[in-house]
Image (cartoon, coloured by chain):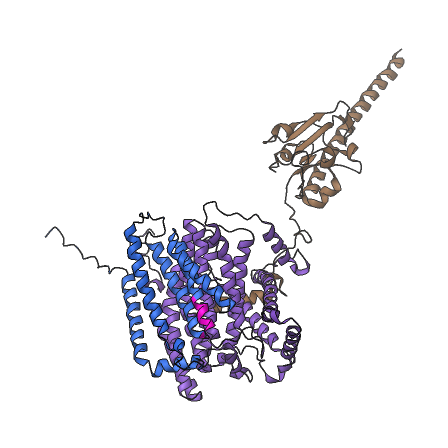
Amino acid sequence: MWFEDLLIQIKSVLVLNAPEGLRPILSAMLSATPILSAFGGLFAAVTLLERKMLGRIQNRYGPNRVGPFGIFQPVADGIKMLTKEDIVPKTADHLIHFLAPLLLLLTAMLGLSVIPYGEKLVAIRFEAGIVFFFAVGGAAELAVFMAGWASRNKYALLGSLRAIAQMVSYEIPLILSSVCVLMAAGTLSLDEVAKSQSGGMLSWYIMTPWGLMGCVLFLIATLAEVNRSPFDIPEAESELIAGHMTEYSGFKYAVFFLAEFVAMFAMCALTATLFLGGYHPPLPILAFIPGPFWLFAKLMVLVLLFIWIRGTMPRLRADQLMEFAWKFMLPMAVINLISTGCWIALGRGSLGWGLSALINLAAYGALNRWLSSRPNQQKRTYRFAEGPMHAA
Amino acid sequence: MTTVFCITALTTLASAVAAMSLRNLVHCVLCLTVSFIGMAMVYLQLSSQFVGFAQVMVYVGAVAILMIFALLMTRGGQELFMREWRPMHWLVGGLVSLALLAVLVGSILQSPVIQNTGPVDKVERVKDLGQSLVYEYLLPLEALALLLTVALIGAALIALPPKQHPIKPQPREDS
Amino acid sequence: MIGKGILKGMMETARNLTGSFHDPERLTTVSYPEEKIPAKENARNFPFLVYDGDDWESGLRCVSCQICEKECPPQCIYIEKDTQKKADFLGKLQFQPKVFDIDVSVCMGCQICVEVCPFESIRMDRDFEYAKSDRFEGLLLHKEQLAKSNKYYHQIHPTEATETDAIRECKRQDHLAKERAKAEKLAQAKEAATKAQSKEPNKE
């Protein structure tokens, strides 16, 4: 608690010593500046961490020339992005072309404002905080469309439509799998959700059968929402060059990636708050370490998991992606809701545990069986190549 | 009439006017989206957080995308040939707008808030909203659910590929 | 099972990740230019001129016969004969090159010049770090840059160098044998002449 109290003390001292008219703005700025600067610095660190970790997975070093172990690589990248020429096509819609990356970054950063970083450390305390988070996440699709359309490029438009389809399809499992936690916590406010998971690791929602399934679904949907591997069709070079980001160069391109990473951080922080107990330590005796540290530790674990997945999996095709969303994740998320309801209704005891685990496993098995019997999942047979007429 | 409300109202009105008068239809949709966001800010200023966020989520996140997709799938995104405005258009449009204004002003002036007759110091909480949905307004909720299900099934049916009939073996020519 | 393949794949990459810190098989990067992979003995890149002994000018084996210049397919060798002659390892006076230029931006490393040289004087080098900022004059190597000692040749291609030395030893032995045969014949002829001379006063 000492850390949170210290921060609140500092902020109240600064605000109360300011002139009357400036107080609201000063208070807002003092809330926003540490968050934005922390996540901006984290973005630079994570780009380097990602490259080094992917390098180690791929049997090579990551960047190691620019500083010791390459720690100045983000600085070099920043200088490169800033000094590149900003090329805008002549027939492009200049206003919308300029606003699209800004809107994407805006929606990503707005999501950071409702996450509780500590006991009393929320930037804005909304009663329906999570609805705000998903609402601004939905506005990101508009920015992607603006980017693709303003470029006046048929292929950029097609790429942006595919990106929007992907984001819209995965928004439903995302929201449905978070609704389970809201049901169990009984509130829409993220602060309350984090508070209800106090008391050690066993009270985290990921330790329940529906919580585990919900967390897995939420993480997969997060990967799809931020266009990250293996769902990175919009930003892959072999897919319509760069999709909706084709006609962007220099700093605007960097802003797209900044927005993607900040959205990833926001969603990982949300995952940590919903399923992993937020700012609570795993064991109550470790409470002297401040809450924001625990949240960032959980965030980094999830980010490492994302980088690990990126290094492992090949990219999904667009139709495989949509099929996965609508035929596996959506039924699984809905059945997870039923299982959560059973867990809550049977009094959160062992009977509820057993029934909820049973429902989840049964759903998983049934979906497996149904999906593996579909024709495009079965082993290919070559009618003419393996017949009696093929050349010996 | 605080400053924030003035700015919000001006933005909403200006973007609504722009949404009607711009030539390029995609620009119109984007200005309409700005006016949706303005509406959401008005809801937030009235302390109804859930409605405000739901407005953003549904209108900006879904309806605007729907309008854009509709524009792109048809040929509305290109420059349309606009006919000349004739005096008859002004007259009819003016009459319809006046009628609509009269209805809106009448209903606002008769609302309990202006006439100070309803309970105004009850703060709406999300919990109350949820409970009233499930207890008092259960039937409309179920009807809405049925409507959404019908829409989903209809969309899936429209999007299904046409059923392919298996090729029947042709009868042999020689007997 | 949905997800089984992904988990197997993730285990494999995790093994790669942790193994790259302690297992040399899992991190096969060689940090060029700080570390270099040792070159194999038979590697070849561009030609160089061999010289015997310590002084490159006097020990240069090349006698500017211009056979390599004529046989080179992309014609990247340019030779100018010098008017002065110098002695080679057998003692005979031979021509020497005044100018011997190889354009390594043209040379394709086919080794034909090495195969046709009768004097074992041009051999293939293993050096590849020739990058220069001037791609015309910088990549035209002159006699000074091309001349490298026989000791260096032994270092980079020990087998070939030993064979070449054996060939040259054979040549030297043949030459010495021929010299000895000539000297003997000369001595015999002299003896016969003196015998004939000594016989004549006897007759008188």
Prevailing SS of the magenta stretch: helix
Q: Which residues are magenta?
A: B39-48
Question: Residue pushed farthest left?
Answer: B175
Could you say which chain is coloured blue in the image?
Answer: B
Q: Residue at x 32, y 77 (%)?
A: B141
| Rendered shade, chain C | brown
Residue A323's spot in the image, x, y percent?
37, 64
Give the position of the C terminus of chain C as an image quadrant: top right
Image position of A276 (left or right of C40): left
Q: Is residue A303 above or below residue C139?
A: below
Q: Is residue A6 above or below residue B87?
A: below
Residue A151 visible in the picture = yes
Nearest the viewer among A63 and C18 is: A63
Image position of A68 (left or right of B80): right
Residue A378's spot in the image, x, y percent?
35, 64
* Magenta segment includes B110: no
Q: Residue at x 68, y 60 (%)?
A: A68
Residue C190's spot in the image, x, y percent?
83, 20
| Rendered shade, chain A | purple
Residue C11 visible in the picture = no
Nearest the viewer among B144 and A306 is: B144
Number of labels in the image equals: 0
Image quarter of residue C181: top right
Give the position of the N terminus of chain C as an image quadrant: bottom left
Nearest the viewer among C100 and A228 is: A228
Image quarter of residue B134: bottom left
Residue A232's spot in the image, x, y percent?
47, 60
Image position of A75 (left or right of C9): right
